[in-house]
């Protein structure tokens, strides 16, 4: 996990444009490529509520020249190694059905087609991930809020169908995710839920930044359960300090 590079909607398109140029240079024009953005990058591409993300997760359908093109763009623009990667394919939120439900976004250099995941399918992915220390819950509330504002509300039935299509059933969806989405649809107050979760996630981010400063290089080696433990311990210490002061 790195907090050094921030990807925004504007520079995301810039990087993808450069990637299209570089891939065309290395690969020629006979074999096109396709990249499907998911996670934070898909949020940036489709919605207005998120200003940035720290990583770009994707499904990459291309020749071996794409890996070289990604590295060349990273070197040219001073981006971290693996700035665009498929690491999420090793997580439980991945589904091979994502290719089928993705939607067109942009084409660069007439060779690189970018697709994204949006709406109820992105909500389903965020539910499966369900990380309290990242943007999963605020992203769900943000997506529901934006669709509600635009007059294209996402229904509970649509989310349930998306979860079933991607993962077969709700069996593996975390309990906290199930409770969250049930509460969201019951209240319909996506604005409050969004703001509350953004605040909680920002606190988590501050805690992890402090941990990273005190333990250089250790954070990226930890899994989600370890990170959750660190956050819980830090919050408990903060709460105890407040109690002692009072």
Image (cartoon, rainbow, N blue to C red):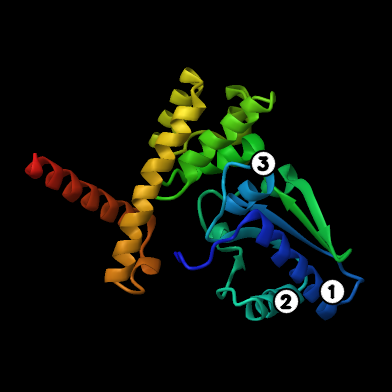
Image spot of residue 55 (x, y percent): 55, 61
Say which quadrant the N terminus sits in. bottom left
Mark 3 neighbour density, 10 Å: few (under 14) some (14–19) many (20 or more): many
Q: Secondary structure at mark 1?
A: helix
Image vertical order of residue 21 relative to residue 14, above or below: below
Residue 126 visible in this rendered orientation of the protein:
yes
Disc on res. 24: 1
Q: Secondary structure at mark 3?
A: loop
Image vertical order of residue 129 relative to residue 224, above or below: above
Instruction: Name the side, left or right, on which 158 lies relative to 194.
Output: right
Q: Which residue is mark 3?
A: 118
Q: Secondary structure at mark 2?
A: helix
Residue farthest front in this picture:
246
Q: Earlier in the sequence, mark 3 or mark 2?
A: 2
Image spot of residue 126 (x, y percent): 52, 42
Image vertical order of residue 218 relative to residue 58, above or below: below
How far separated are the C-alphas under marks 3 and 2?
26 Å
Instruction: Name the side, left or right, on which 75 lies relative to 213.
Output: right
In front of the other: 98 or 111:
111
Residues marked 1 and 2 touching at CB (< 8 Å)? no
How far separated are the C-alphas under marks 3 and 1?
27 Å
Q: Which residue is mark 2?
A: 69
Q: Earlier in the sequence, mark 3 or mark 1?
A: 1
Q: Earlier in the sequence, mark 1 or mark 2?
A: 1
């Amino acid at each position: 996990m790195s907090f050094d590079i921030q990807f925004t909607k504007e520079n995301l398109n810039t990087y993808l444009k450069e990637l299209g140029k570089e891939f065309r240079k290395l690969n020629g024009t006979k074999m096109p490529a396709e990249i499907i953005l998911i996670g934070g990058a898909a949020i940036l591409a489709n919605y207005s509520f998120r200003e940035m993300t720290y990583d770009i997760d994707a499904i990459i359908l291309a020749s071996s020249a794409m890996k070289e093109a990604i590295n060349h763009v990273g070197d040219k623009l001073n981006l971290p190694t693996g700035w665009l990667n498929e690491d999420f394919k090793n997580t439980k939120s991945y589904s091979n059905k994502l290719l089928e439900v993705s939607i067109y976004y942009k084409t660069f250099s007439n060779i690189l087609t970018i697709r994204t995941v949006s709406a109820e399918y992105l909500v389903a992915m965020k539910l499966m991930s369900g990380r309290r220390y990242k943007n999963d819950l605020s992203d769900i509330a943000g997506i529901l809020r934006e669709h509600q504002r635009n007059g294209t509300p996402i229904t509970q039935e649509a989310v349930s169908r998306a979860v079933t299509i991607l993962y077969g059933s709700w069996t593996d969806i975390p309990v906290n995710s199930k409770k969250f989405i049930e509460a969201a649809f019951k209240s319909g107050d996506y604005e409050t839920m969004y703001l509350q979760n953004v605040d909680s996630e920002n606190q988590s981010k501050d805690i992890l930044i402090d941990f990273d400063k005190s333990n250089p290089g250790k954070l990226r080696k930890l899994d989600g359960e370890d990170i959750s433990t660190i956050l819980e311990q830090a919050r408990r210490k903060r709460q105890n300090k407040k109690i002692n002061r009072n």
